[in-house]
Image: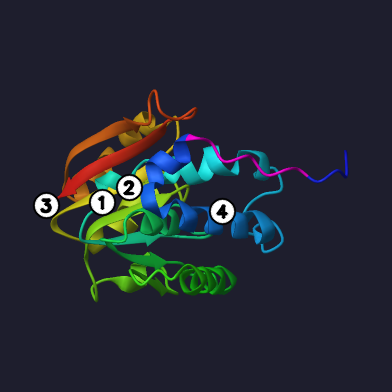
């Protein structure tokens, strides 16, 4: 195996269009993640050559879906929460992460990037309810839908939404989660594919209304 360090993916041209006047903040975050992410256990060693495409753009393409108050469950490196908070300064974001070293990273980035629309909470989603509910709850690469619904749906306000970033098997995950969908009273559960014709890799979002 080669010891030559992997290079960071060059910023795709579409990034500036998606972030608009927030692109410099996005660049600062991406540079910090590229510099410290592997060492701090936030991203894997093979992620640098696809950091923009696979992670930053995959997250920001969903920015128009959010409004009001949003919780990101299992924020980890800040994907998608910090990326979305950069793109949508008009939305209030609560990043919920149980692991101390990741919370430290999130706090550092919130301060360094000047994100006054972000609160970082060290907790599991189960520990948040019934203290706080949100207009929208999101998560990315956390767990299968049948496991994710019971920890996300209870912290969505009545009439609020789930917007969960998933992979290619999103449709199959919905089928496997029918029991949880019924139990937690989810309506209009569907997969939306974002970024077709815009991104080299599309993003799949499982959306649902909580009643």
Q: x and y percent of residue 97 in the render?
A: 46, 67
Q: x and y percent of residue 2 in the render?
A: 88, 39
Q: Secondary structure at mark 1?
A: loop
Which of marks 3 and 4 precedes in the sequence?
A: 4
Residue that carries the numbered disc 2 in the rendered image: 63
Residue at image position (34%, 53%) is 138
Residue 83 left/right relative to 128 = right
Q: In 3D space, how far apart are the residues under numbered discs 2 and 4 (Cα atoms)?
A: 17 Å
Q: Secondary structure at mark 3?
A: loop
Q: In 3D space, how far apart are the residues under numbered discs 1 and 4 (Cα atoms)?
A: 21 Å
Q: x and y percent of residue 82 in the render?
A: 44, 59
Q: Which label number is shown at residue 211?
A: 3
Can residue 27 be seen here? The reply is yes
Q: Is residue 57 above or below residue 162?
A: above
Q: Main secondary structure of the magenta part?
A: loop
Discs 3, 2 touching: Cβ within 8 Å: no
Q: Secondary structure at mark 2?
A: helix
Which of marks 2 and 3 precedes in the sequence?
A: 2
**Magenta-tinted stretch:** 6-13
Within 10 Å of disc 3 (Cα), the crowding (few <14, some 14-19, many 20+) is some
Q: Which label number is shown at residue 30?
A: 4
Q: Which label number is shown at residue 66?
A: 1
Which quadrant holds residue 83?
Answer: bottom left
- Residue toward you, 2 or 10: 10
Residue at image position (59%, 72%) is 101
Q: Secondary structure at mark 4?
A: helix
């Amino acid at each position: 195996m080669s010891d030559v360090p992997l290079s960071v993916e060059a910023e795709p041209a579409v990034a500036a269009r998606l972030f608009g006047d927030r692109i410099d903040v996005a660049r600062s975050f991406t540079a910090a993640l590229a510099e410290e992410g592997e060492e701090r256990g936030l991203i894997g060693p093979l992620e640098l050559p696809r950091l923009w495409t696979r992670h930053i753009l995959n997250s920001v393409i969903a920015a128009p879906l959010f409004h009001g108050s949003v919780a990101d469950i299992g924020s980890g490196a800040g994907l998608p929460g910090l990326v979305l908070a950069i793109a949508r300064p008009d939305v209030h974001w609560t990043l919920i992460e149980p692991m101390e070293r990741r919370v430290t990273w999130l706090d550092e980035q919130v301060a360094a990037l000047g994100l006054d629309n972000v609160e970082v909470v060290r907790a599991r989603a189960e520990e948040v309810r019934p203290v706080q509910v949100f207009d929208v709850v999101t998560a990315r690469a956390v767990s299968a839908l049948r496991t994710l619904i019971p920890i996300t749906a209870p912290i969505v306000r009545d009439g609020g939404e789930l917007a969960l970033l998933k992979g290619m098997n999103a449709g199959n995950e919905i089928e496997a989660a029918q029991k949880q969908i019924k139990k937690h009273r989810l309506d209009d559960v569907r997969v939306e594919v974002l970024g077709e014709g815009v991104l080299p890799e599309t993003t799949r979002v499982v959306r649902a209304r909580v009643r």
